[in-house]
Every structure is written in C-alpha cells, then in structure tokens.
C-alpha cells in the first residue's frame, strides 16, 4: 500500500517513550497540522479540573497486563496518570512520542525522526511493540495526521502502520481508539472536531472491515456540541487537547468498563 508522505510540512520534534519513568519531551507549540512535543511539565503533573476520587486497581485492570498503548502526547498524559496511580490499567506499557502520528511513524528512524524509544533506543513502532511482547495494541493517533494528510490519507497511513505491527507481532490484537476532541475555540482550520469526527467514523469502518477492535474513547470526552469537555482539558489557553486527571480517569474508566466488549 502506498504511504502518504509530506515531509516538508511534517513535525520534526523528537518524542520519548514513557515506560517506567516519565520525562517531558518539551513544551508544546500549536500548528494546524497537529501537536508538537509533549504537554508542558505543569500540565503533566497538575491535577486541574474537578476534584476526583483516587482510583484503586480493579480486577478488570488485569485485562491490560499484556497491552501497550501507542500514541502521541494525549496518550503520554495517560501514561503520567497511570504512573501516579499504579495498577489502574494493570501493567500496561506505553510507547508514546509527543509528535507521533501514523504518517511519521512510517518514516525511517533517524536523528530528527519522532519515533518513540524503548530501553534507550529509538525504534519503529512495530519494533517497539515486538520488543515489549505486547499481545494487545491500543492505538490512538490522529492529532498529528488529520490536519496534515487529511482524513482519508490518515486512515490509510494508520492501516499501513497496523500491517507493519502485525507482520512483527502476528498474534497481537489490534484496538483502535478514536481520536479525542478539541476544546471549543481551540480548533484549527483543518484540525477540528468536524474532521476528527469524520476520521473516527472512518476508523470505526476500518476496524469493522479488518476485524480490529474499536474503542470510542471520544464518546465520553465530549459535551453536547461535540467539543472536549472543559472539565477534562488541562491546556484551555493553549492547544485545548490534553487532559486533566479527571479526563484521564474518565478514559481509564471507559476502558475498564468496556474492555471485553470492544
């Protein structure tokens, strides 16, 4: 399958893998094509938004013991939450990079590529998944793709990435997570909630066609107009996409409650 490239406009900020420790990949900057870098150190550690009940590990969390979460800085934020609350997603691992997208994940690894690292080595996503021994692969990518490649090519690139993962880990189960919404007023020209909804609908259809699982995380993050719930947004004056602790907990609760039904 032909890979949809656009190197000239692509994001070149290096990201980092969050596995046992959490390191910021730098402060974010806003572009129409997506998100650059990770969240700021403040938004990574702050517990803004409504007061939450500290979660306790549940029996359902064991479902994620052999899972890896692949994503950009949105998933990076989830990894920080899981580090602060050990066991809430079992022993799930995270393969994340602040500027990662399904498009740039298909590039060769290089000094300026945004591939995540595993045990100190930058590597392709499919190699990282294999090295981790993951049996369940939860992918959430799109913020760094939809504005740059458009909906159709973003879906094509994600499907290509999935095929690469399955070539290296043929027994892995694929779980596509919908891209989460943007706070009202923080949308860009092409990276906006309307296009993200179209992208998510296309991802759901891809999952149906290919026999993958589909987790509609966006459904529990939205308010009535389809934008991100302000209570879940940790960067309302900046990109409007990252989560408070309350938002991360809602995401985890959704996964725990629906894991067997995806």
Image (cartoon, rainbow, N blue to C red):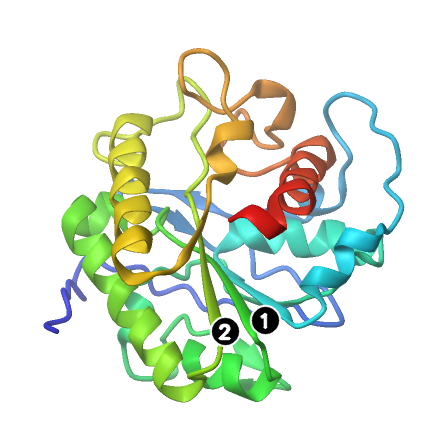
- List x then y, in percent, for residue 132: 60, 83
- List x then y, in percent, for residue 114: 41, 70
Question: Badge 1 local density, few (<14 within 10 Å), some, or many (20+)?
Answer: many
The residue at the point 15 percent across, 66 percent down is 5
Question: Badge 2 local density, few (<14 within 10 Å), some, or many (20+)?
Answer: many
From mark 1 to mark 2, how far is it between C-alphas? 5 Å
Q: Quadrant of residue 202?
A: top left
Instruction: Indicate which disc residue 167 carries.
Output: none
Which residue has dot 1 on it? 17
The residue at the point 37 percent across, 46 percent down is 143
Closest to the observer, 132 or 39:
132
**Residue with the most extreme left position:** 2
Q: Is residue 89 visible?
A: no
Element type at marker 2? Answer: loop
- List x then y, in percent, for residue 14: 45, 69
Q: Quadrant of residue 157?
A: bottom left
Element type at marker 1? Answer: loop
Considering the image in quadrants, where does the N terminus appear? Answer: bottom left
Which residue has dot 2 on it? 116
Pointers 1 and 2 in contact (C-beta within 8 Å)? yes
- List x then y, in percent, for residue 186: 40, 25
Would residue 253 be found to the left or right of residue 196 on screen?
right
The residue at the point 61 percent across, 51 percent down is 260
Would residue 205 be found to the left or right of residue 110 on screen?
left
Would residue 28 be found to the left or right of residue 40 on screen?
left
Q: Is residue 69 above or below residue 198?
A: below
């Amino acid at each position: 399958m032909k890979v949809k490239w656009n190197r000239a406009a692509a994001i070149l900020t290096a990201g980092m893998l969050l596995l046992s420790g959490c390191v910021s990949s730098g402060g974010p900057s806003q572009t129409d094509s997506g998100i650059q870098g990770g969240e700021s150190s403040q938004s990574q550690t702050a517990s803004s938004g409504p007061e939450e009940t500290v979660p306790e590990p549940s029996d359902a969390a064991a479902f994620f013991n052999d899972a890896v979460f692949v994503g950009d800085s949105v998933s990076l934020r989830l990894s920080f939450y899981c580090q602060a609350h050990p066991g809430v997603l079992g022993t799930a691992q995270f393969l994340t990079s602040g500027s990662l997208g399904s498009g740039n994940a298909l590039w060769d690894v290089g000094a300026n590529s945004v591939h995540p690292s595993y045990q100190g080595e930058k590597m392709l996503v499919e190699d990282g998944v294999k090295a981790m021994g993951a049996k369940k692969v939860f992918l959430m990518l799109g913020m760094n793709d939809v504005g740059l490649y458009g909906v159709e090519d973003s879906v094509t690139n994600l499907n290509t990435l999935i095929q690469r993962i399955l070539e290296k880990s043929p027994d892995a189960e694929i779980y596509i997570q919908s891209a989460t919404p943007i706070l009202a007023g923080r949308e860009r020209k092409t990276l906006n909630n309307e296009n993200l909804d179209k992208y998510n609908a296309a991802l759901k259809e891809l999952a149906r066609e290919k026999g993958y699982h589909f987790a509609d995380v966006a459904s529990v993050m939205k308010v009535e107009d389809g934008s991100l719930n302000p209570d879940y947004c940790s960067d309302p004056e900046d990109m409007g996409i990252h989560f408070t602790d309350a938002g991360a907990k809602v995401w985890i609760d959704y996964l725990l409650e629906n894991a067997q039904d995806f």
